[in-house]
Image: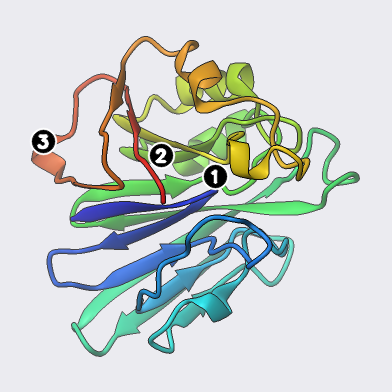
Amino acid sequence: MIVRYLGHSSFWISSGKATSVVIDPYGTHIPYNFPPLESDVVVISHEHRDHNADYRVNGNPMLVKRTHDFQCEQEVMVQRTKETLTFHGLPTFHDNFNGRRRGPNTVWHWYWEGIHFAHLGDLGHLLTDQQLKILGKVDVLFCPVGGKITLNPTEASLVISQLEPRLVFPMHYLTPQIEKMELAEFTLKDFAAKMSSVEDAATMAMEIELARLPTQTKVMMLRHE
């Protein structure tokens, strides 16, 4: 499988059968280069414009998002590749005040080629025991780390300790491009200082497979354009 970082909280993931998923595409107000790529599925964690710009993804993708306050499951069948994916939506909040400040957030998790993926969206709090029980063992975690409106580096490290994933892709952190946008206050370097095993991939994409995932939690830093 290939995981490509598109910037902010957005990733493009492609399977061995060439089925592709884009998670949390951001709007044009975010000054990163969003590539003109195609995808079969777009997954949205919440309805803020830096996460829900599905119109930017080509290929007439199927849209996965939570439409009520409860857990949900959405199965999608990609006719082009004959591959079926089931996305599980776990209700969470965008803040530590039960959503009263920034609203709801969905943690989407799914199994693909034997790998359990989880994308935390704009999670704003530690996970409860019940939420941890629902998520179970996560292999690959996409985790916000920049603070201000989502998990800060310390909180992100605690959530990672809660889940004990094998591979972590950090996201939603402060960069020079967004420093005046009130979206984050901590850099990727600030987060990396909290973690014991960190690798700079020095590229925007990498291949992953179940047999080659690390046995202990490793943070993998991908570049974005």
Q: Please tell me which residue lies in front, 160 or 137.
A: 160
Q: What is the number of the mark on residue 98?
A: none
207 sits to left or right of 137: left
Q: Residue at x 39, y 24 (%)?
A: 164
Q: CA–CA distance between discs 3 and 1?
A: 23 Å
Crowding around mark 2 (Cα neighbors within 10 Å: few <14, some 14 to 19, many 20+) is many
Quarter location, residue 213? top left
Helix, strand or loop at disc 1?
A: loop
Q: CA–CA distance between discs 1 and 2?
A: 8 Å
Q: In the rendered structure, which amino acid carries the disc numbered 3?
A: Arg
**Closer to the N terminus: mark 2 or mark 3?**
2
Q: Residue at x 14, y 46 (%)?
A: 209
Residue at the disc numbered 2: 141
Would you say the residues marked 1 and 2 are in contact, meaning their CB atoms lie under 8 Å apart?
A: yes
Residue at the disc numbered 3: 212
Residue at the disc numbered 1: 120
